[in-house]
């Protein structure tokens, strides 16, 4: 008889684990509270306008290709991928526009144009961070279930390159003489919801990854990856249960034995994979007596990422601006301090714009387009009353966007819009404190010190997603699904 697995949550990590386990012959039930797959990677559709709810950058494509290879499939047979180059437009308050590229020759010319003299420093950045990447990536492919993992040959070889005691900004500032060039290569700490002045310098591999191998867009949006995985899951015999919230993980004798659904039906299984937001899962799905390391009080004391204020705009025209755009506050460091430390709304916020229809016209009706706006803001530990602040902050962001000359008439062309605040992330999307990038990646919340893939609080349970190792971001979330499915396979071998 096949071994049975219950997977909670059809986000990218849950889908990866579910697909791999179904491929290996397990009987897998995947429970998703929403009416579609994807979690924060889901499709958002409003009157014919299609958006990605969350992630819009696809990096380190090789990891996703490896997942598809393990599933006996080729990624390019399922998704049409467009390379975005230049990677993005970075706009500074003094009017400087910088267009980084993954084409080395183009990038060196662009640096010489905007930040003369730093082109030679950029080559040193690529050399050193490339070496660092080669040491660190193997450490992100394996679990850290015991302290003994820190004594593996792999980890000891990587240790001198991990830069735990430095921060991203300081490490990258050592390469470049122009302050804006330093910001251009360190703002990527925000992909983890952290300040580059606090994020461990381990993560200087993030700008290296996108500069070395590029950024991609799947036609239809990044949500197409999740929908594709759902089809593969069905092809492998998996059972997907949409609009089926899990109420509680069933635990007996220190082991997970299944789930209780919101309709009170109990599904017994040999193992459980948890893809819900980690702190939400602990506080809502697991009785406190079963998680002494993660009591409600202890979870509240953990460090969490920032949140985001989101605008999804359907427009009656297409603007001629790049696919990805980042607009920095005049005092970027102050803006970051207000988000992460003071936890107040900035008078002068930075923001990101995705103009995806310049690459992918399938996302909007003919002659129209989408504009996706992301503003980093404090998480809900700030106490900000978003019911009161929502409209005024929305108006402030629209006004800021309209100060860009090519977007000055934006407010006249909005046909539809949706807003997601940090409060919405928490109440509607079940993200603890609205911290959309999950637990912060501090040195005390990484590797063995992060909640483990083979969950340590009770047996037969495995974690996937941004709240476990290797961490936040689509590539590492896919990798978490691989790691946890491998652990489960080793613990619960399928016999035929």
Image (cartoon, grey):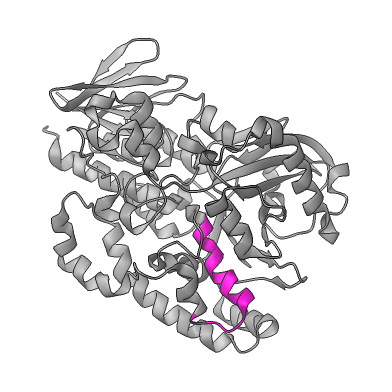
Q: Position of residue 311 (x, y in %)?
A: 69, 41
Residue at image x 57%, y 37%?
A: 383
Regarding residue 269, the answer to whether it shows in the image is no
Residue 131 shown left or right of residue 356 in the figure: left
Q: Is residue 348 above or below residue 460?
A: below
- Asked whether 315 or 417 is in front, the reply is 417
Magenta stretch, residue numbers: 174-190
In the rendered image, residue 124, in percent from the top left (x then y), is placed at: 46, 84
Q: Is residue 283 above or below residue 358?
A: above
Image quarter hosting the C terminus: top left
Residue 368: horizontal and vertical position, in percent?
Answer: 79, 43
Q: Give the tally of numbered discs.
A: 0
For the view shown, which residue lies furthest in the top direction? 264
Look at the image and tell me whether residue 489 can be seen: yes
Q: Is residue 249 above or below residue 306?
A: above
* Image quarter hosting the N terminus: top left
On screen, residue 190 versus residue 370, left or right, reads: left
Q: Quadrant of residue 452?
A: top left
Magenta-span inclusion, residue 208: no
| Front-most of residues 101 and 272 | 272
Image point (68%, 53%), residue name:
353
Residue 287, image quadrant: top left
Picture quadrant of residue 359: bottom right
Q: Position of residue 483 (x, y in %)?
A: 27, 48
From the viewer's side, name the closer residue of 86 and 426: 426
Q: Is residue 187 magenta?
A: yes
Residue drawn at point x = 16 percent, y = 68 percent: 153
Residue lying at 48% horizontally and 81% vertically, measured from the top left: 174
């Amino acid at each position: 008889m096949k071994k049975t697995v219950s997977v909670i949550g059809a986000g990218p990590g849950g889908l990866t684990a579910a697909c791999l386990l179904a491929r290996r012959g397990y009987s897998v039930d995947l429970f998703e509270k929403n009416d579609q797959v994807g979690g924060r990677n889901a499709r958002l559709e409003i009157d014919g306008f299609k958006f990605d709810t969350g992630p819009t950058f696809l990096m380190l494509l090789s990891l996703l290709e490896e997942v598809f290879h393990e599933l006996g499939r080729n990624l390019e047979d399922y998704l049409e991928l467009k390379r975005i180059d230049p990677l993005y437009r970075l706009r500074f308050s003094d009017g400087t526009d910088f267009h980084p590229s993954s084409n080395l020759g183009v990038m060196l010319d662009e640096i010489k144009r905007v930040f003369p003299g730093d082109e030679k420093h950029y080559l040193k950045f690529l050399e050193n961070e490339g070496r660092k990447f080669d040491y660190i990536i193997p450490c992100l492919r394996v679990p850290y279930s015991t302290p003994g993992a820190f004594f593996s040959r792999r980890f000891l070889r990587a240790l001198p390159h991990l830069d735990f005691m430095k921060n991203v900004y300081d490490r990258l500032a050592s390469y470049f003489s122009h302050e804006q060039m330093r910001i251009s290569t360190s703002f990527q700490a925000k992909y983890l919801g952290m300040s580059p002045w606090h994020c461990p310098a381990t993560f200087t591999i993030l700008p290296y990854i996108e500069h070395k191998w590029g950024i991609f867009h799947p036609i239809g949006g990044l949500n197409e990856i999740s929908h594709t995985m759902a089809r593969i899951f069905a092809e492998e015999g998996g059972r997907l249960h949409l609009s089926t919230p899990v109420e509680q993980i069933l635990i007996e004798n220190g082991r997970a034995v299944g789930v209780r659904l919101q309709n009170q039906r109990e599904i017994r299984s040999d193992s459980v994979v948890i893809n819900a937001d980690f702190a939400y899962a602990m506080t809502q799905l697991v009785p406190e007596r079963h998680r002494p390391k993660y009591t409600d009080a202890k979870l509240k004391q953990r460090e969490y990422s920032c949140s985001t204020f989101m605008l999804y705009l359907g427009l009656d025209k297409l603007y001629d601006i790049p696919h990805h755009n980042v607009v920095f506050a005049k005092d970027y460091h102050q803006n970051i301090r207000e988000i992460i430390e003071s936890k107040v709304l900035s008078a002068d916020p930075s923001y990101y714009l995705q103009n995806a229809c310049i690459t992918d016209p399938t996302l909007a009706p003919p002659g129209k387009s989408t504009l996706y706006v992301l503003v980093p803001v404090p998480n809900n530990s700030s106490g900000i009353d978003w019911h009161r602040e929502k409209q005024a902050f929305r108006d402030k962001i629209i006004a800021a966007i309209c100060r860009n000359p090519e977007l000055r008439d934006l407010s006249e062309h909005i046909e539809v819009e949706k807003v997601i605040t940090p409060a919405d992330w928490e109440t509607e999307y079940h993200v603890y404190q609205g911290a959309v990038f999950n637990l912060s990646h501090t040195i005390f919340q990484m590797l063995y010190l992060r909640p483990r893939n083979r969950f340590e609080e009770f047996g037969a349970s495995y974690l996937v997603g941004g709240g476990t190792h290797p961490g936040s971001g689509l590539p590492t979330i896919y990798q978490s699904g691989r790691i946890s499915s491998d652990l489960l396979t080793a613990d619960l071998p399928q016999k035929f």
